[in-house]
Each structure stands twice: as C-alpha cells, then as structure tokens.
Image (spheres, helix red, strand yellow):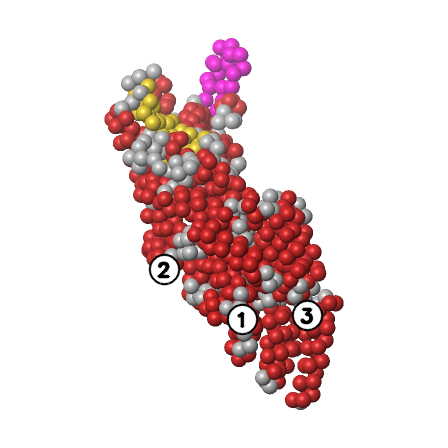
Amino acid sequence: MRGVLREVHHRSMWQVLGLYIAAAWLVLQVVDVLADNVALPDWVFPVALVLLLIGLPVVLATAYIQGGQRAAGAGAPAASPGDNAAGTTGAATNPRERSEAAGRRGHMLTWRNAVLGGLGAFALLAGGIGVWLAFRAAGIGAAGTLVAKGMLDDRAAVVISDFAASGADPALARTLTEAFRIDFSESPTVRVVDPARITQALRRMERDPEALLDLELARELAQREGFPAVIAGEIGVAGSSYLLTGQVVAAGDGAVLVSHRETASEDDLLDAIDALSQRLRERIGEPLGSIARAAPLERVTTASFDALDKYSEAERLMVTGGSRQRAVSLLEEAIEIDPTFAMAHRKLGIALFILGEQRERQVEAFTRAFELRDRLTDHERYITEGTYYTYASAQLDRAVTAYENALAIDSLGPALNNLGIVYQSLGDHEQALELFRRDIGSDGGQSTNPYVNSLFALASLGRPDEMRELFDEMYARFPTPSSHDWGAVAMLAIGDYETADAHIDALDAQTGDPGLQSQARLLRALSVGTRGRVAEADELLEERAAIEAERRLPGRVWESQVRRARFEIGVRRDPQRALDRMREAEAMAPVDGLSPFDRPYAQLAIVYAEAGRRAEARRWLDAFDEEVWPLAGGDPFLDLLRREAHGSVAEAEGDTAAALEQLRQMDGRFCPECRSLSLGRAFDRAGVADSARVYYEEGVTVPSGSRGFTDAHRLGRAIQRLAQLHDEAGNLSEAAVFYARFTELWADADAELQPDVRAAQDRLEEILREIG
C-alpha cells in the first residue's frame, strides 16, 4: 500500500483529482443557473452529474497512465548482463522497449482523448438541450409549453380554484390556496383573475360568493367569463408526508393540460407549494406563441349554465346579423330552463321588436324582466329598467335616467347604444349618433347594432355620403344577409334606389330562408312601388303574404295586405280594390285569431275611411280604442298610427277641425314625413292651399330614417300635388323643380300611371319655355 501511495503521488493524481472536482463544481453551478433562468427540463442537471461521474475514473486512469509514461521516458537503470542470462522470457528490458509497451497499454487513455471525450459528451448534452428548447418553442411533444402549443394566450387570464382537501385539514387547504395564488400572481406568462371579478361573476351565477370555488364551479365560471383555463390544486396525506397536486385544466372540455406533484413534510409545505407553482408556470411557458381564446359567454345573471349558453348564442346572432328567428327560439329555450332569467326575458322582447312581431309578447317579456330586476346586478337592473321604459311604458325621460345610471357603472357598456335609441326617438339625432359611434369604438365594431342605428341617424341628419362610408365599413366586418337587409332600407331612406336594389338582389339570393325571401319581397315592393311600378309591388306583396301565412305569422300577412290596400288608395286611387285586399287578408288570417294587441284595427279604420266607408271606419276605430290602445302602455309608434286613424276617420266624417287637431298631435320625431304629408293632404282637401303647400314640401324634403318604409304609397303623389299647388300659386320655378322630380321618380311607372307622368312632363316643358 505504501508503494501504491508513493506511485500515486509520483504520478500527480491528487492534483488531477483536485482540479477535476473544482471544474465539475463550476460546470454544475452553470447548469443550475441555466436551469433556473431558461426553464430547462428536470433531466439536465442529473445528466450533467452522471457525465461528470463517468468522467472521473477516466481522468484518473489517464493521469495514472500518462504519469507512468513520463517516468519511463525519463530513463530507467540499464539491465545487467546477468538478467538475460538468468533465463528471462523476452520481456523488454531497456527503456525504449518498456516505453513502447506502456504506450500500447495506454494509447486510448491520453489527455487529448480525455479532453475531447469530455467536450463531446457535454456537446451532446448541449445539443439535446437545444433540441428540447426548439421543441418547446415550437410546441412539439412533451417539451412544448401550453403557450407554444397554442393552448393558452400569452398573458391569458386564468382562474385559480380552491385546493381540494383529500384526507387533509380543509383549513390547511385554504392556506395553501392563498399561498399558491400569491405565488402564481407573479407569473409573467398568465394573469390570475382577481377575487373581486370572481365575486361579481358568482353573483351573476346566483351562487354564494363565499362558497368553496371547487374545480367544477371554477370551470363553469371560466366558461361564462371567457377565461381559457383553471388551475386546480389538491392536498392529500401520504403516510407521514403530504402529497400536493397541481393541474392546468381547459375550461371548455375539462381536459388536463398539465399536471405536477410534489411531496413534502409538514415543515416543508410552503417550499413544496413554491416548487409546484414554479413547475406549472414553467410548463405553461414564457411568451413563445399565442392563440385566440374562446369567446366569453355573456355576463348576465342566471344560475343555469345551459340557459346562459343559449342566451349567449342568441346574443351573438343578434349582434352579428344572424338569424333573428333562431335567436328568438334560443331565448325561449333559455327562459324554459330558467324562468327567472330576467335578461333573457328582456332580450326576447328586443328580438321580437326587431322582427316586428307579436307586440303583446314583446310587452309581456319587457314587463317580466322588469318584475325580476331585483335579482340583477345594479348595471343589469338599470339596463332592464331603461328597456322597459323605452319599449313597454313609453317613459322616455325615465329611460334616459336609467341608461345614464348604467353608463356611470360601465361607460362603454350596452347602455351606449340603448341610450342612443332613446335620443333618436326624442328627435335628437346628433346626440344619438355620438352615442352610437362611441359604442362602435368601445367594442371594436363587434356588433351590427350601433352601425345600423348610426345609418338611420345619418339619414335623419341628411348626410348620405357618410351613410355610404359607414355601410361599407359595416359590411366589411359583417358580410351577412342582415347587412344587405339594413343596407337596402337605408338606401331607400335617401332615395338611392339603384343601390337599394343591389342589396335586395343579394338578399333575394338567400333561397333557403323563407324569412329572408319574405323580407326581400317587401323591400323590393317598397323600392318599385315608390317609383310607380305598383302592379309589380302588388304581386310581390301578395307573394309575401302567402309566405307569411305558410310561416303562420298572421301579423305579417295583414301588414302585406294593408300595404297593398294603401297602394290601391294612395297611388292607383281605386278604393274598391283596397277593400278587396282587406277581405283577402281576413280570409287568410282572421282578425279574431290574432292576439288583441296585434289586431290591425287602426289600419282597417284608415283604409275604410279612405274608401269612403265611414260607418265601417268608425267601427274599426272604436274597436281599436277599446281593445288595443289600453294594452299599448302609451307606445309612441302605435300612438302615431292612432292619431293618423282618428284624423282619417274625422276627415271622412267631414269634421275637418277634429281631423287637423288629431294630425297635429302626431309625434313627428318618429316619422316626420308621416305627420307632414298627412297634414298636407288634410289641408289640401280642406282647400287651404298655402298650408297644404307648406306641409307637402316639408313632407317630401325632410330627411328621415323611416322613409324606406313610408315613401312607397305617399311620395309620388305628394310630389305631383306639390308641383301643381306651386303652379296654381304662380311659383313657376318651384313648380318646375317638383314636376321634374316627379317625372324622374315615375319615369318607369306602370302604363296606367303614364298619363300623369306625360302631363307633368308637358307642363314642365311649358314652364321652362315660359321662364327661359
């Protein structure tokens, strides 16, 4: 042993060992620092340690061999002649021979080979780490982080559920949850949803905010709010130790994206929580990629997730211009699941209002939502009150207050668009437009509603060029049939019939949807009817009535037939055919079969009054006052129709003063041309030419968003009569302007109307010759 130790010392192995240990320590420190800062996998440090341990005997053996070779090369005592004579077997006895023998034994264990081998081993390790990092960045295999794989956004918001206690103290689980949440909140990769937002969401879910936020509840909350994932933990007992488990769970399908475990004694629990958090954060990944997260469900109060899911789908259909009938069905299903779902009742009323159907059900839905408002958050309650005051009770001042209260809570919420609608109803189109534009900017243009409302505000302000620009912007975001629907109405409102027809053609191409086919026929009838092509309009409206009868929508059957009747009276001036249309409507959809609110008594009163059937007109008007108006709650749109009906019946009965009084009370904010043209006709028939001329001119020139629906049976004859009144008064320049406008509008009118067009053209030419 003494000899061996002398040999080791002689060959400098102690020095080599010391140097190797120092170098190995330095390598391990570098690897440890990189592992912490680059989030290297668990296997890097153990592999580096194994490589260093493997290298130790190689280095020591090399030192031993190389030390021996140095000694041999330095020269050894020469062999005595007696050695060979002693009968050796040929072993090398001189220094060169002994050196060559040692070289053969140690030719692999050279310092060059040892250094190259060590560098090669660590190069392979570095290559493995590089491949792993590349896979991690690309989201490939087990190395890929959730961010890189596209499973989570960079800086995605995640919900941390309360730790489950499996055989452990629940109080300890709560403590660990808080420690875990604090640690995770430091992550640069994800954002932890703050407790205040969770509390708000739980209240909308009608859950106790103090209840345990277990994984199931956390997932439902995340789905409702649009958060992509839940981070869940569990503490269990394993003998004398604790077992901590953490998981990243997809909110949508509950798939476990990442999981990790740590074991700890009671004294090491907080360290284990730190380690668990760090490992999950590492697996989630630094910002190496991103993917769009799922759209959140609507943030409204209901205890039922299924009901909320249906509500959210209906909302998406309504704001993007999808099927409104489908939206109504979804809302009805949501209410069936949760009858106390106040916001679903409210939205159902709005959907029916947009469709123009079942007014009685609209009021019922708005009223039920209003009755349930105490179950809602303050913001939802103000929105619900504003809707009720707007559509059910016609208390517009109270609606303004309610929506302003809602905006005080959320300045970029849905109250922007709703308050704009109220101001539009009050005739303040500038204020309405400002609110609609703020609404477009607040959600990045994610809904068609503020776009559509802006179009009609601009129409009422007489700004057609801005209308066209805004429509192009809307259609670029929402290239849907609904956009063509609103585009056609908007273009009709400014008299751009060519563009309106193009939108109607696109709508008519939707052959698989009866609702869209019906709407296309209505809009085309309005377009061609305004231009004097009444026979075509009549045929289109007849087809529409048949479609709506097939769809079992009697209110729309009557709407179509009433429009046909008003064409007969207002354009063709054939009252008998107008009465025929009313009888056809009764055969298709008996009035008694309609709900009281939907019975078209006011329209019948107007048609019969215009046809000179005073007794029948009075009977229908009395029925309206007794059965329908008490249910209206002061509805301003229905009040407009009521005043027109009373004025028409009074005029038919020869009471001009009463007729004018009723017509003056028509609310011109909703339809300024309706009031003006009705008064113009009444003064004209009463022989008051100056007043007739003033109101006719106002009626045919005032900009209005409602013209798309009202001009068809009024505008042509009103322009013709206004030209004649100016002509009779000697206002030849003004007469020429309106004769020209009339002949241009009715240039392609039906043959039976062409004599009126030629007479206007002839008189226009005479005036032009006369005035030069």
Pointer 2 or 1: first along the chain: 2
Reading the chain from its start, which is encountered first: label 2 or label 3?
2
Camera-side mark, 2 or 1: 1
Residue visible at 51% across and 12% down in the picture:
88
Asked whether 207 falls inside the magenta stretch, the response is: no
Provide the secondary structure element on which disc 3 rests.
Answer: loop
Please say if the residues under marks 3 and 1 sit with CB atoms less than 8 Å apart.
Answer: no
At horizontal 52% and vertical 61% (from top left) the residue drawn is 645
x 49%, y 25%: residue: 106
Q: Which residue is mark 2?
A: 397
User: Is 87 a magenta residue?
Assistant: yes
Q: Earlier in the sequence, mark 3 or mark 1?
A: 1
Spatial separation of the CA atoms under disc 2 and disc 3: 43 Å
Q: Residues within 10 Å of mark 1 (few under 14, many from 20)?
A: many
Please say if the residues under marks 2 and 1 sit with CB atoms less than 8 Å apart.
Answer: no
Stretch in magenta: 78-100
Q: Where residue 694 sits in the image (x, y, percent)?
A: 52, 77
Depicted 163 relative to depicted 137: above or below: above
SS class, disc 1: helix
Q: Secondary structure at mark 2?
A: helix
